[in-house]
Image: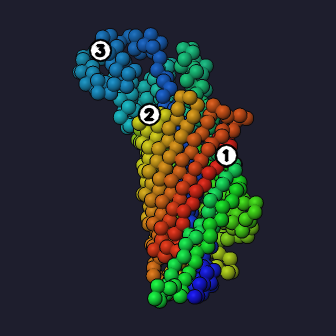
């Protein structure tokens, strides 16, 4: 009976099957890490939006108190204070039809209505006109400053908040101004996270542990192929993400991003993996849209050696509609491998689309559709990967947070493998669960317990199918 192993098959099929394990494994860590960082920043922005800057009507100033139509003016101010834009619109129309209406009150209401309806440019123009006439109109300046904050004009908003901090305002308003200034300082500093912890993986080599009988005669297997046995190991994993934005002029600026992640296995160093991804380039930001375009460089290491180097370009567009956001990332990069795996040299195009919804400030739901196209020198190593993601994140009042996600993908290779006599096709599933404990944070470090289950079902079952479980306990520092 002839029983060749998977290693012999890999040799016979080289270089077609000799691709590094990590080249076809769960290679979307960078996208997940960046999505987590981006969503954390979105959650922080959601919290700041809850702080109010309006002041009681008796503190509004001379413009309101001298309103000749006191009842209509007071009703208009009350509607603005409650952000009741459906009431503001008809009230403003009736008010401006009066013969002796105050044009400044009408202008303030019109600016507030434009801001509430998302017409940022119109609101900014009306507020600036109003403040040119009445520079001491504190309520108008508060709303104008918040508008600048929402429009990502960080330098201008900081200047206005510093001016307002010296005004005679209620303590609650001054306290909220402090929250906005803290958020502005955070926006203009490095933001991100660093995570380090222990991990146990049940199948670091992503092995099937299965056998396949190619030739059977009279009920006896004469030609049998065996996949590798799974290797379980304990190790240390780390993940780091950092981003910083510099405002150059108006809504235009520069953004820099760094991602790094990897793992060490003490007794299985051949399976150590490390990645460093760096990019910096142009960014546009306003109240609704963020667009970035930047070159990138990447280094990947495996088993203590350089696996590949890459260069490319990435772009990103984010649409913020308050309670929900849409994000699209597109990336092109060229990968160059070491001498033994030069046939894997080629391009990788990735597109990630994510829709996030915030029904409450402590709850986020999201879903996404992703597409990847990998081209290599050998068509048999070229593939297309289409996947879908679903997830949720929840913060609890007791000082805990939890997140769960599921990813489903289909990977189809371009050409048939001559040795295996079929074209590789894998169905992939990845499930993640993490629980964090802010209440147990010490020295700024939050403990996070995580679990990942991944399973791949390939049409070459004995070689490419596998199951993998991973449990980790990490300390996370956010900044």
In the image, 224 versus 305, the foreground residue is 224
Count neighbours of disc 1 (C-alpha within 10 A) and say few if under 14, some if 14 to 19, many if 20 or more: many
- Dot 2 falls on a residue whose secondary structure is strand
Tell me which numbered mark, 3 or 1, is placed earlier along the sequence. 3
Q: Which residue is mark 3?
A: 72
Q: Real-space Cα distance between discs 2 and 3?
A: 34 Å
Count neighbours of disc 3 (C-alpha within 10 A) and say few if under 14, some if 14 to 19, many if 20 or more: some
- Dot 3 falls on a residue whose secondary structure is helix
Of discs 3 and 1, which sits in the foreground? 1
Image: 16 above or below 383? below
Q: Residue at x 50, y 53 (%)?
A: 431
Image coords of residue 409 (percent x, y): 45, 63
Count neighbours of disc 2 (C-alpha within 10 A) and say few if under 14, some if 14 to 19, many if 20 or more: few
How does the figure colour the protein chain or chains? rainbow
Q: Real-space Cα distance between discs 3 and 1?
A: 59 Å
Q: Which mark is residue 231?
A: none
Q: Which residue is mark 2?
A: 360
- Dot 1 falls on a residue whose secondary structure is strand
Tell me which numbered mark, 2 or 3, is placed earlier along the sequence. 3
Q: Residue at x 49, y 76 (%)?
A: 460
Image coords of residue 70 (percent x, y): 32, 10
Tell me which numbered mark, 2 or 1, is placed earlier along the sequence. 2
Q: Which residue is mark 1?
A: 474
Q: Real-space Cα distance between discs 2 and 1?
A: 27 Å
**Occupied quadrant, residue 343:** bottom right
Image: 107 above or below 198? above
Image: 215 above or below 167? below
């Amino acid at each position: 009976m002839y029983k060749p192993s998977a290693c012999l098959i890999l040799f016979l099929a080289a270089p077609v099957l000799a691709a590094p394990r990590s080249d076809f494994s769960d290679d979307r860590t960078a996208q997940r890490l960046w999505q987590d960082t981006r969503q954390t920043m979105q959650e922080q922005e959601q919290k700041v939006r809850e702080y109010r800057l309006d002041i009681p009507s008796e503190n509004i100033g001379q413009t309101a108190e001298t309103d000749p139509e006191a009842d209509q003016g007071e009703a208009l101010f009350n509607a603005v204070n409650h952000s009741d834009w459906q009431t503001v619109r008809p009230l403003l129309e009736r008010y401006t039809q009066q013969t002796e209406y105050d044009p400044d009150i009408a202008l303030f209401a019109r600016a507030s209505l434009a801001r509430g309806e998302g017409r940022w440019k119109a609101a900014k123009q009306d507020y600036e006109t109003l403040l040119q006439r009445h520079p001491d109109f504190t309520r108008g300046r508060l709303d104008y400053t918040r508008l600048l904050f929402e429009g990502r004009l960080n330098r201008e908003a900081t200047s206005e908040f510093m001016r307002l901090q010296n005004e005679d305002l209620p303590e609650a308003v001054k306290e909220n101004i402090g929250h906005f200034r803290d958020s502005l300082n955070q926006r203009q500093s490095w933001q991100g996270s660093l995570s380090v912890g222990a991990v146990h993986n049940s199948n670091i080599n992503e092995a099937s542990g299965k056998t396949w009988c190619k030739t059977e005669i009279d009920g006896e297997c004469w030609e049998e192929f065996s996949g590798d046995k799974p290797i379980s190991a304990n190790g240390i994993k780390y993940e780091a993400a950092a981003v910083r934005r510099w405002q150059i002029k108006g809504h235009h600026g520069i953004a820099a991003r760094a991602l790094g992640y990897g793992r060490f296995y003490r007794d299985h160093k051949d399976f150590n993996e490390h990645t460093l991804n760096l990019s910096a380039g142009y960014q546009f930001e306003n109240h609704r849209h963020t667009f970035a375009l930047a070159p990138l460089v990447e280094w990947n290491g495996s088993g203590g050696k350089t696996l590949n180097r890459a260069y490319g370009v990435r772009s990103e567009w984010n649409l913020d509609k308050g309670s929900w956001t849409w994000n699209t990332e597109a990336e092109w990069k060229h990968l160059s491998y070491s001498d033994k795996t030069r046939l894997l040299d080629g391009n990788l195009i990735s597109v990630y689309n994510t829709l996030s919804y915030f029904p409450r400030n402590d709850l986020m739901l999201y879903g996404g559709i992703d597409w990847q196209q990998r081209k290599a020198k050998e068509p048999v190593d070229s593939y297309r990967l289409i996947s879908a993601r679903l997830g949720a994140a929840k913060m609890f009042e007791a000082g805990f947070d939890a997140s769960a996600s599921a990813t489903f993908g289909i990977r189809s290779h371009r050409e048939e493998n001559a040795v295996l006599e079929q074209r590789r096709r894998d169905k992939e599933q990845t499930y993640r669960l993490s629980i964090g404990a802010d209440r147990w944070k010490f020295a700024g470090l939050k403990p996070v317990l995580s679990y990942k289950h991944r399973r791949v079902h390939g049409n070459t079952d004995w070689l490419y199918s596998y199951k993998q479980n991973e449990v980790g306990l990490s300390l996370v520092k956010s900044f």
